[in-house]
Amino acid sequence: MTFDRGRAQPGLVRAAATAATAELDNAGLRAAVALQLVEVRQSRTRIAAAQFAERRTIERNLHDGAQQRLLALALQLRAVQLGGDEASLRQAISTGIDQLQAAVVELRELANGLHPAVLADGGLAAALDDVAARTPVPIKISAPDRRYPPDLEAAAWFIACEAMANAVKHAHPTTIAVDVSAPDGQLIVEVRDDGIGGAQPSGPGLRGIADRAEAFGGSLTVHTDPGTGTTIRAELPCES
């Protein structure tokens, strides 16, 4: 039997090319997965650092706010009690009531920033309306009046709030619009402002918003030009 090199070579070349292509594809997939793992680790590190900073802020707010107010009230009441002056006691009780009410408001606002009761009770649309009513810039909310899984509502709410706060702080807008929709198994949160534009996606504010979206398995895109405002769009996976 004779060996026909003319016939064998094209087949060998094709087989080698197929194997090489498959190996290149596998190498590309491995590189992409490795890059995603690095990005996830970096994102988790930033989230952990942000959460630690938020806890320190909460501790400071409690210490400097309601805690100091309640301690001062306790000392005032104790001093009046030891003094035995009835008129002073009545005045101290009246002042104490005002101080307690103020402390309750501070604690409610702090808790509302962690996870607003209106979000749990009324859903995402109601919670966004509540934020809009307390923001100094006019905000138009467009959101469906339906409920989503609690963790998804919380992620969308935090993203929208941080995007609005970032716009108010840096963009100096006259209006902000927040649109929420849920097409094709995704929850989309879009925040647009008519401010000065020029937002930096790599900056700490927008990077933190992107981390929240990515931690939930979603993504964040930022469109901005100087003088034309900024649009922040978060896409979160939604099981509906």
Image (tube, helix red, strand yellow):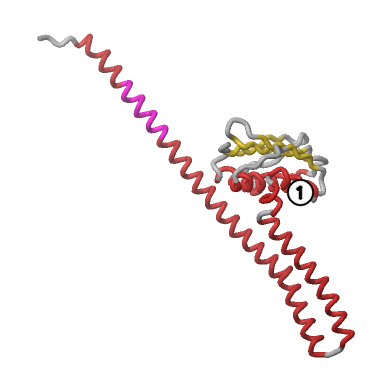
The N terminus is located in which quarter?
top left
Our reading of the magenta stretch's main secondary structure is helix
Residue drawn at point x = 81 percent, y = 75 percent: 96
Can residue 27 be found in the magenta stretch?
A: yes
Residue drawn at point x = 67 percent, y = 35 percent: 181
Tell me: 26 left or right of 69.
left
Q: Position of residue 190 (x, y in %)?
A: 69, 37
Q: Quadrant of residue 52?
A: bottom right
Q: Residue furthest right?
A: 87
145 or 59: nearer the eye? 145
Residue drawn at point x = 82 percent, y = 86 percent: 80
Q: Residues within 10 Å of mark 1 (few under 14, many from 20)?
A: some
Give the tally of numbered discs. Answer: 1
The C terminus is located in which quarter?
top right
Q: Position of residue 203 (x, y in %)?
A: 64, 46
Secondary structure beneath dot 1 equals: helix
Tell me: 215 left or right of 27.
right
Q: Mark 1 = which residue?
A: 130
Q: Quadrant of residue 217?
A: top right
Name the residue type under label 1. Answer: Asp
Task: Establish if 27 lies above or below 131.
Answer: above
42 or 233: nearer the eye? 233
Can residue 135 be found in the magenta stretch?
A: no
Q: Quadrant of residue 239?
A: top right
100 or 3: nearer the eye? 100
Q: Position of residue 140 (x, y in %)?
A: 78, 39
Task: Establish if 121 lies above or below 26.
Answer: below
Q: Position of residue 31 (x, y in %)?
A: 42, 37
The stretch in magenta equals: 17-29
